[in-house]
Amino acid sequence: RIEATMASLQGNVAGEISIGCSTTSGKYLLPGLIVRFRQRYPHVGMGVVVASRQTILNRLKEGQLPLGVTSKHFGQSDIEYTDFFTDEVILIVPRQHRWAQFGSIYPDDILDEPLILREEGAGTLEVLYDGLRQHDISPDMLKVVMTLGNAEAIEMAVEEELGVAFISRLAAARGLALGRIAEVKVERMPLSREIYLARCLNFPITRSQAEFWDF
């Protein structure tokens, strides 16, 4: 803190920044981004708070968090957004699964397969449901065998051959690289979601926060 104060007095960018994160892509992307930012501004301390999208929004509006990463644009006039990342949601299956040999399936094929889903309200689940509805498939038609609260747990469950799942490509990267799971293309059903960096306009922004926003 003393070093940060001295740096600030000397005109350097310094201070503390807390960033709320509600998405898998944010969890995977923020650490590397923070490292690069601190290489440029070593006197800035940074922390990441993982919470739901609604919690992130509430904390932004209450001034408890200066910045947040979210997969939902809430459309409120006092919240400013900037594009952060386009997250691709992919279908993963166990390495020895028959679909891994085919490489692609059609949306209707999903109906008879044990499916592992994220919890209600998760961004990837909303993207999946929207994609399925375009092919006249409703959530109640799915053969759901398990619901888990994070993408990492889902990836591990797929590795253990408990079912197939749709998760962020970022969350699937490790399992794919190690050959423990396989990606299967769903014909005519590309899935993606936009990820945003958000801030509340009702509160003044510090120099370090402004630099990170621009960075």
Image (cartoon, helix red, strand yellow):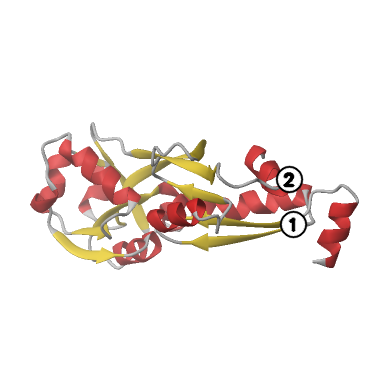
- Left or right, residue 196 beside residue 187: right
Residue furthest to the front in view is 202
Question: Within the image, what quadrant is residue 118 found in?
Answer: bottom left
Residue furthest to the right in view is 10
Question: Within the image, what quadrant is residue 4 found in?
Answer: bottom right
In the drawing, what numbered circle is on residue 207? Answer: 2
Measured from the top left, where is residue 16 in percent x and y?
A: 70, 58
Q: Amino acid at mark 2?
A: Arg
Q: Which residue is mark 1?
A: 15
User: Which sits in the foreground, 155 or 195?
Assistant: 195
Measured from the top left, where is residue 44 in percent x and y?
A: 74, 56
Q: Amino acid at mark 1?
A: Gly
| Image position of 18 with respect to 129: above or below | below
Q: Looking at the image, can residue 140 be seen?
A: yes
Which residue is depicted at the point 48% across and 40% down? 78
Q: Quadrant of the C terminus?
A: top right
Q: Quadrant of the N terminus?
A: bottom right
Measured from the top left, where is residue 183 in percent x and y?
A: 33, 47
